Amino acid sequence: MDEAIRKANVLIEALPYIKAFHKKATVIKYGGSILGEDRVRKGVLEDVVFLSYMGLRPVLVHGGGPNISDRMRKSGKKTNFVDGMRITDQETLKIVEEELEKLNKKIVKEIEGFGGKAKGFTSNKNSILNVEKKKSKVDLGLVGKMADVDTNQMLKDMSNHIIPVISPMGKDSKGVIYNINADEVASFVAAALGAIKFVLLTNVKGIMRDMDDSNSFLASIREDEAKKLIKDKVIQEGMIPKIEACFQAIDGGVKKSHIIDAKIPHALLLEIFTDKGIGTEIAK
């Protein structure tokens, strides 16, 4: 009986959030580094389907970096990065496109396997991302930056409880296809949709003042405080672009951004539907 009451209390705790987020877009970015772990991936996708059944309107943007790098290594092609961005020639673009297409189809199929409805948006099918060539101190080749996104089809699908699954590739005004940073795509889409939340699923717990001290974990932080931690070099390396994507979403009108560890079972549900949450919440 006590266990049953505890479960009921958990559901009641979630009720205010279910009401507040009903019919609201929540954009979730799922990093390629954890897409390859079957247990983690399927757990996340099950949570995404749960969100849909609870009346939220989830949108999933996926990466695919490790799959792409592995394919390039097997093909004998060298991978070059500048400031975390993959230099992309025509041959590399073909590999990127093929690997992201496979991942997109796999994610859509697995969402459907959990009883949800999903639709893939890729450079070859239902293309909605409009880009410009990204300018850099080094020519990155076919690497783009977001210019616009066609939200009309997404909104129509979301109103019919279909989960958009977006691959980070887009086209410019001439129809040239570009590779895009998935974090940038996700934050741009979140702002364009007026999402209530932007969630980055990663392989780290969230923001820490000291990576060697678990007690330094920050459950919530304001944007200006996070910028100061970057300036003071408390936040470094791979975490910086993730936090900057959170800033872009917030600056675009998204109320809150979140960084959570996807390896924690049901982390997505815990972050969205509980008072305490499980990761770091970033707000204005």
Image (cartoon, grey):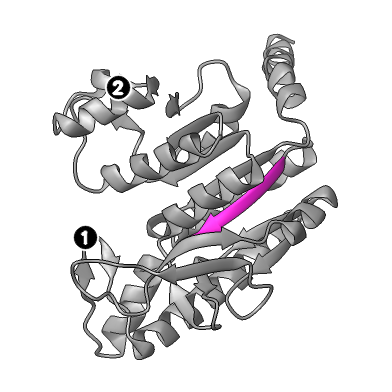
Local secondary structure at mark 1: loop
Q: Mark 1 highlights which residue?
A: 83
Mark 1 crowd level (few <14, some 14–19, many ≥20, 10 Å Cα) = few
Q: Mark 2 highlights which residue?
A: 225
Q: Which residue is farthest front?
A: 173
Picture layout, residue 162 above or below residue 273? below
Residue that appears at 79% across and 41% down: 53
Q: Is residue 154 left or right of residue 231?
A: right
Residue 206 in magenta stretch? no
**Whole-percent x, y for residue 45 in the image:** 61, 51
**Whole-percent x, y for residue 24 in the image:** 72, 36
Mark 2 crowd level (few <14, some 14–19, many ≥20, 10 Å Cα) = few
**Whole-percent x, y for residue 122 in the image:** 60, 72
Residue 60 in magenta stretch? yes
Name which residue type carries label 1: Asp
Please, what is the dominant secondary structure of the magenta stretch? strand
**Residue nearer the viewer, 53 or 82:** 82
The boundaries of the magenta stretch are 57-63
Quarter occupied by residue 133: bottom left
Picture layout, residue 129 above or below residue 249? below
Quarter occupied by residue 87: bottom left
**Whole-percent x, y for residue 118 in the image:** 73, 60
Answer with mark 1 or mark 2, whichever residue precedes in sequence.
1
Q: Is residue 68 left or right of residue 213?
A: right
Q: Are marks 1 and 2 in contact (CB under 8 Å)?
A: no
Q: Quadrant of the N terminus?
A: top right
**Residue nearer the viewer, 267 or 6:** 267
Name which residue type carries label 2: Glu
